[in-house]
């Protein structure tokens, strides 16, 4: 049992002696923001004192008295703080236990959870129209969606990645007409596509082919190539046209009618979305019989719910108004709102030499995602796109991201991993054979920099769980940056190898370095970023090997 669970169990038993019964889940234990306040803290006295008609600080004193007599493992000191918080200060041995746990679990199992119980999840992301290449703005949703999928997998869910292909409608028609016009030196339609890629693709297009089908496949190939360059692979490329052919759209409309969720007015068919909180009802079928975008989307979500228990959508900023109507349609079809999570990605401002680069698929002023990856690399692109919460807009500085300097976050984190391998390599060259961790004296690990690494490693499992529940992979990015900083500080504060370092200390620190490797590999994998064993820095041509 880990120390957190052990402490909660001790608190639970103490409460029982005071005739208070609380479940394990009702007892909250947190890490204080200030380490001087202790290693762990609980607000249980505050939480239940009102119900008991007791003064919270007085009740906290009673709980503390019982806990002191129980003498929980690793306990050094128990204190009452503020209006009734109970703070626990532990011996460093609890962190040495963490080291054992990390090493024992390894990269395959540390910070891994089983809460998903193989529950099926579909994460749908990117889903760009096949009317041109993916632009740099698509990269944010792509990296976010793939990292979300990785988080769910780490938490024990069975995950599928879906790309929804809008391969019918006006935009596809205009795209095909634009290709055909360019190929035959005719005037492109007024609302057509004029990007540079139209000229390139039209020149590739063989004569006597259907420009719609050829253009459709060419755009999809472009999407796949860019995404695979980011190490992103989809399990399902779902065609909107396939739903029309299968009759699924009409079946969905029938189901909505059976649920009394639609009505007809002015020759059109409307969804009663106001019944579920929308500001107005929405058209599903126009008066001319054409489907709006909403009805195929509802049908697609209906299909996804047949394949999975939980849906996670990653949409662009222009889809914010779509959330309520989609929840309305799914509620009408009998699905719970909490079973459909929707994340909206805000805009990315791409910069070069301090100047913003505009993105527009129509006018041709476009920076393709493939170009960004080619310039800065997959790892740097993914890490940068995941630096901030997708709720906020982002500046993507191509100049900084391409540089191998400490100010570049991805370099800073990857360099920590490369340093670890440098240390291991030097220890092997020195002929140092690390004993088993059971035979290693970990009690010598007492330096603040050593303990800070172990505290951070202990937090990673909770961080993974929280990031999954909140659909927030940027928390892992932040953890990895903070952890890399802790490791670099340890590297400068605590020498691992050297004639003036005792073999006992060296052996313990080598195990600490191994645990740090586990944490970095796990976090970088969740971000889809590699963990290199060697790196170079641009400054003065200096090689970074630790």
Image: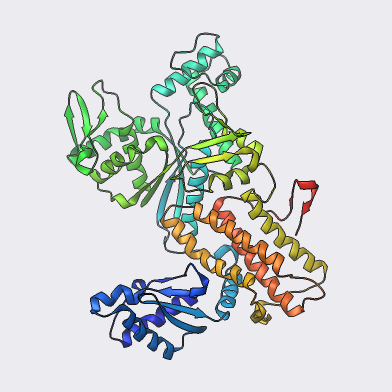
Is residue 525 left or right of 24 when viewed as pictured?
right
Residue 366, located in which quarter of the rendered image?
Answer: top right
Spot occupied by residue 118 in the image (x, y as percentages of width and height): 43, 59
**Image vertical order of residue 94 relative to residue 216, above or below:** below
Q: Which residue lies furthest to the bottom in this view?
A: 69
Residue drawn where x is 45% and y is 40% of the image: 346
Front-most of residues 23 and 33: 33
| Residue at x 47% of width, y 19% of height | 176
Q: Is residue 340 left or right of residue 394?
A: left
Residue 296 position by quadrant? top left
In the figure, is residue 92 to the left or right of 375? left
**Residue at x 44%, y 60% (from the top left corner):** 466
Question: Which part of the image, by quadrant, shows the C terminus?
Answer: bottom right
Where is residue 336 shown, x and y percent of the image?
Answer: 28, 51
At which x and y percent is residue 502? 77, 79
Front residue of 245/523: it is: 523
| Image location (x, y in percent) of residue 75 | 50, 84
């Amino acid at each position: 049992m880990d120390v957190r669970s052990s402490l909660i169990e001790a608190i639970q038993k103490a409460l029982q002696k005071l005739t208070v019964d609380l479940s394990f889940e009702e007892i909250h234990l947190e890490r204080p923001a200030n380490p001087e306040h202790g290693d762990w803290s609980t607000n249980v006295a505050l939480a239940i004192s009102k119900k008991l008609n007791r003064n919270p600080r007085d009740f906290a004193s009673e709980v503390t008295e019982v806990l002191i007599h129980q003498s929980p493992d690793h306990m050094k000191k128990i204190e009452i703080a503020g209006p009734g918080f109970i703070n626990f200060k532990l011996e460093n041995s609890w962190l040495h236990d963490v080291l054992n746990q990390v090493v024992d679990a390894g990269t395959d199992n540390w910070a891994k959870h089983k809460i998903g119980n193989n529950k099926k999840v579909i994460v749908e992301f990117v889903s760009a129209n096949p009317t041109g290449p993916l632009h740099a703005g698509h990269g944010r949703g792509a990296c976010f969606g793939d990292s979300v999928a990785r988080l769910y997998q780490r938490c024990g869910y069975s995950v599928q990645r879906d790309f929804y292909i809008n391969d019918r409608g006006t935009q596809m028609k205009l795209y095909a007409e634009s290709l055909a016009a360019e190929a035959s030196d005719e005037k492109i339609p007024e609302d057509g596509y004029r990007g540079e890629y139209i000229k390139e693709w039209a020149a590739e297009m063989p004569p006597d082919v259907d420009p719609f089908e050829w253009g459709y496949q060419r755009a999809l190939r472009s999407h796949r190539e860019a995404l695979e360059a980011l190490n992103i692979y989809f399990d399902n490329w779902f065609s909107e046209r396939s739903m029309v052919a299968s009759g699924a759209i009409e079946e969905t409309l029938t189901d909505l009618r059976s649920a009394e969720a639609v009505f007809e007015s002015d020759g059109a068919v409307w969804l009663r979305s106001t019944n579920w909180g929308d500001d107005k009802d929405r058209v599903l079928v126009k008066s001319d019989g054409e489907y709006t975008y909403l009805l195929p989307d509802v049908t697609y979500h209906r299909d996804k719910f047949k394949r999975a228990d939980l849906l996670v959508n990653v949409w662009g900023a222009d889809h914010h108004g779509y959330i309520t109507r989609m929840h309305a349609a799914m509620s009408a079809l009998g699905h719970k709102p909490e079973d459909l999570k929707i994340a909206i990605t805000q805009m990315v401002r791409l910069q070069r030499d301090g100047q913003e680069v505009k993105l527009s698929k129509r006018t041709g002023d476009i920076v393709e995602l493939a170009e960004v990856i080619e310039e800065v690399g997959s790892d740097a692109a993914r890490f940068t796109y995941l630096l901030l919460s997708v709720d906020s807009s982002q500046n993507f500085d191509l100049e900084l991201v391409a540089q191998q300097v400490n100010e570049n976050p991805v370099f800073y984190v990857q360099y920590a991993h490369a340093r670890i391998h440098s240390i291991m390599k030097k220890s092997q060259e020195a002929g140092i054979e690390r004993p088993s961790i059971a035979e290693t004296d970990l009690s010598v690990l007492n330096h603040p920099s050593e303990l800070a690494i172990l505290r951070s490693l202990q937090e990673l499992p909770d961080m993974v769980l929280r990031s999954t529940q909140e659909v927030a992979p940027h928390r892992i990015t932040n953890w990895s940056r903070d952890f890399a900083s802790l490791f670099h500080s340890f590297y400068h504060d605590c020498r691992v190898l050297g004639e003036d370092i005792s073999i006992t200390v060296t052996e313990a620190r080598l195990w600490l370095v191994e645990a740090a490797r586990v944490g970095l590999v796990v976090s970088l994998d969740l971000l889809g970023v590699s963990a290199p064993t060697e790196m170079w820095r641009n400054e003065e041509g200096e090689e970074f090997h630790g």
